[in-house]
Amino acid sequence: MSDSHMILAIHVTDRLKKALPVQQVFTEFGCNIKTRVGLHDVDGNVCAPGGVVILELVGEPGIDDQIAGRLAGIQGVEVKKIEFGH
């Protein structure tokens, strides 16, 4: 992955119920997560149950597939991979 930027976009349908297993994967692969951004709708009255997490990854080739596979194995979690080559 050194010649590209690998991004995982993760959609979580129920953040309150799925936060723990998703965070466990993030912790397991913490040394491969360069950047992490979480997004969800919030205002004074509503906190949306779903959200999106964007990860920029570093590490050995194939680590993106390992992380994506683990996350996709969690019910209610969808993963999309984006690779920007150089």
Image: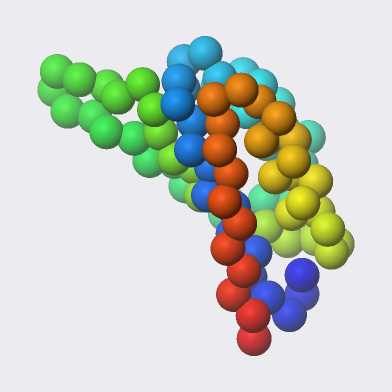
x and y percentages locating residue 68 in the rendered image: 70, 45
Report whether 67 appears left or right of 39.
right
x and y percentages locating residue 20 in the rendered image: 62, 19
x and y percentages locating residue 33 in the rendered image: 67, 51
**Res. 63 visible in picture:** yes
Determine whether 49 is above or below 2 in the image: above
Report whether 86 appears left or right of 37.
right
Kindly identify the residue that appears in the image at 80 percent across and 46 percent down: 66
Quadrant where the N terminus is found in the figure: bottom right
Determine whether 5 is above or below 64 in the image: below
Kindly identify the residue that appears in the image at 67 percent across and 57 percent down: 57
Farthest-out residue, top: 17
Determine whether 67 is above or below 34 in the image: above
Farthest-out residue, left: 44
Q: Depth check: 8 or 36 in front?
A: 8
Kindly identify the residue that appears in the image at 45 percent across and 20 percent down: 14
Residue 19: quadrant of the picture:
top right
Q: How many marks?
A: 0
Report whether 1 appears left or right of 23.
right
Quadrant where the C terminus is found in the figure: bottom right
Kindly identify the residue that appears in the image at 58 percent across and 44 percent down: 79
